[in-house]
Image (cartoon, helix red, strand yellow):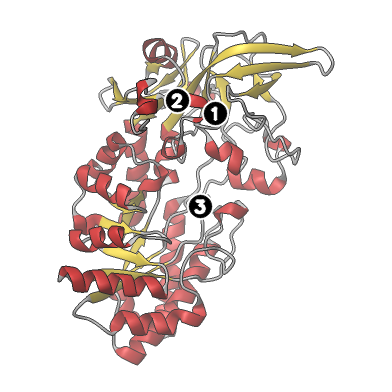
């Protein structure tokens, strides 16, 4: 595409990926209106080329450092089997958070030595599965969980690989619900228990190999500093333990949290509070983040005279949102329209509710809305937009009147029932969290492949599926 054409694209567009073509929204050149005609709505559409492009961006950032850096895709962001297959083929490892995600990762073709297992409340059965499979690392979340891993290893006659998830007490400028590195969060082992955790983890080397340390500062983090501060905290513990025991770990896992720019189109940015706006428009280059973490790492290693520890240390990251968010679009049809003469509002009622966009309700998450049928038309008319659920919270604005979402959405003038709309950047924490509230069958999912072919990768649920596991 020429520079002139790129410059003429709407602000929300990603050239060659999501953009207007002949008036309609096109996803990798495939007409979204035609996809909706074939598969009905609501409909999720994912781009395989965009997933690969996002992964390649991370891999290029790592390769330029000259230091071992590995990525484990955070499958909690979206564990659709078709997506796991693309991630595997693109050369990433994987992070899971449950026995179910572990099962899916293995079924998708990931080797056990590519898998990291997180979670605060792993069951004994899940720990047995992880130990039995021989995965790369179980990130233990408490002193108690170390004992569960020891028990599983003893029972199975295996040697488990573990990493300790620590709490560095580092705050970020992300959403309060996404803060995971504070003592007020439910995650990890606190500083007061670190010495005991290392002692227990090293007490039975025939059963457990302590291979790493894990931290995670939170998701959608717009700054580099929380990552570097967390590294500094963890490095001090790593050096102290090595000097006390001689044990050297193999990796430091800095978690995920790389942000996605949800406010590429800033037409409604000023309608959000400043702190929300800064989070949603974050554009943190992963290369900058990794370079800065390694700069701090080298400084700390030199300062503590422990360069030999850093030389043998691999850095792990667990990106999820940054790989999948802007690779997904949710198509939805306007099914009803209401005019309120008393308020002057026009309401559009769609077939996509918070059962498909849970974060819009729980975190007041912003997904940019456009007309897929008139993608190149001016979007300057305000509408109240809501979903189909019998729930007052099923709206595309903030019912608590706290201004954390725009009160109105801007769309072309004269939207009518039957018009196709699109919610952008909807690939992360949507499909993974969707549920059939109000007896609404879960939607179909289509993936546009590298060759431009669109393929159904999840069929739409039927009414019979609603009864699949019920006994009466």
Question: Mark 3 falls on what kind of element?
Answer: loop
Residue placed under numbered mark 2 in the picture: 18
**CB of mark 2 within 8 Å of CB of mark 1?**
yes
Residue placed under numbered mark 3 in the picture: 219
Q: Nearer the viewer, residue 213 or 438?
A: 438
Question: Mark 1 falls on what kind of element?
Answer: loop
Quadrant in which the N terminus appears: top left
Q: Residue furthest front?
A: 472
Q: CA distance from mark 1 to mark 3?
A: 22 Å
Quadrant in which the C terminus appears: top left
Neighbourhood count class around disc 3 (C-alpha, 10 Å): few under 14, some 14–19, many 20 upward: many
**Which of the marked residues, 2 or 1, is nearer the chain's N terminus?**
1
| Residue 448 drawn at (x, y percent) | 32, 25
Circle number at residue 12: 1
**Which of the marked residues, 3 or 2, is nearer the chain's N terminus?**
2
**CB of mark 1 within 8 Å of CB of mark 3?**
no
Tell me if residue 6 can be seen: no
* Picture residue at 48% right of the left edge, 33% below the top: 426
All told, the count of numbered labels is: 3
Viewed as shown, does residue 155 lie left or right of 458?
left
* Picture residue at 39% right of the left edge, 79% below the top: 197
């Amino acid at each position: 595409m020429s520079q002139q054409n790129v410059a003429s694209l709407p602000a929300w567009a990603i050239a060659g990926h999501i953009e207007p073509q002949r008036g309609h929204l096109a996803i990798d050149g495939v007409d979204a209106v035609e996809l909706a005609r074939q598969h009905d709505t609501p409909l999720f559409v994912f781009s395989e080329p965009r997933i690969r492009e996002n992964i390649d961006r991370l891999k290029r950032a790592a390769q330029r450092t000259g230091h071992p850096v590995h990525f484990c895709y955070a499958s909690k962001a979206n564990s659709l089997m078709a997506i796991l297959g693309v991630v595997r083929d693109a050369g990433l490892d994987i992070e899971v958070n449950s026995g179910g995600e572990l099962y899916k990762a293995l079924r998708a073709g990931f080797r056990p030595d590519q898998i990291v297992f997180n979670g605060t409340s792993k069951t004994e059965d899940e720990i047995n599965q992880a130990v039995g499979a021989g995965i790369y690392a179980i990130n233990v979340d408490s002193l108690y969980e170390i004992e569960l891993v020891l028990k599983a290893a003893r029972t199975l006659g295996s040697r488990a690989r573990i990493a300790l998830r620590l709490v560095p007490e580092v705050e970020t400028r992300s959403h309060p619900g996404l803060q995971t590195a504070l003592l007020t969060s439910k995650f990890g082992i606190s500083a007061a228990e670190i010495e005991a955790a290392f002692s227990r983890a090293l007490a039975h080397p025939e059963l457990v190999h302590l291979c790493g340390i894990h931290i995670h500062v939170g998701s959608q983090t717009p700054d580099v500093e929380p990552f570097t501060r967390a590294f500094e905290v963890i490095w001090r513990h790593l050096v102290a333990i090595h000097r006390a025991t001689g044990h050297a770990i193999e990796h430091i896992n800095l978690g995920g949290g790389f942000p996605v720019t949800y406010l590429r189109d800033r037409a409604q940015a000023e309608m959000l509070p400043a702190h929300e706006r800064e989070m949603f428009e974050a554009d943190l280059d992963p290369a900058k983040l990794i370079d800065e973490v390694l700069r701090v790492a080298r400084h700390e290693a030199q300062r503590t005279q422990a360069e030999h520890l850093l030389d043998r240390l691999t850095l792990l990251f667990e990106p999820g949102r940054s790989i999948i968010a802007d690779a997904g679009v949710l198509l939805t049809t306007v099914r009803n329209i209401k005019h309120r003469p008393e308020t002057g509002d026009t309401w559009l009622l769609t077939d996509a509710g918070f059962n498909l966009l849970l974060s819009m309700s729980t975190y007041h998450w912003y997904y940019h809305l456009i007309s897929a049928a008139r993608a190149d038309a001016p979007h300057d008319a305000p509408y109240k937009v809501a979903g189909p659920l019998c729930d007052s919270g099923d709206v595309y604005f903030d019912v608590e009147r706290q201004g954390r979402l725009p009160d109105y959405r801007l769309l072309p003038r004269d939207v009518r029932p039957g018009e196709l709309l699109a919610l952008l950047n909807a690939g992360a924490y949507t499909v993974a969290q969707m549920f059939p509230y109000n007896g609404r069958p879960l939607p179909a999912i289509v993936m546009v492949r590298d060759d431009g072919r669109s393929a159904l990768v999840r069929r739409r649920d039927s009414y019979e599926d609603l009864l699949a596991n019920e006994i009466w």
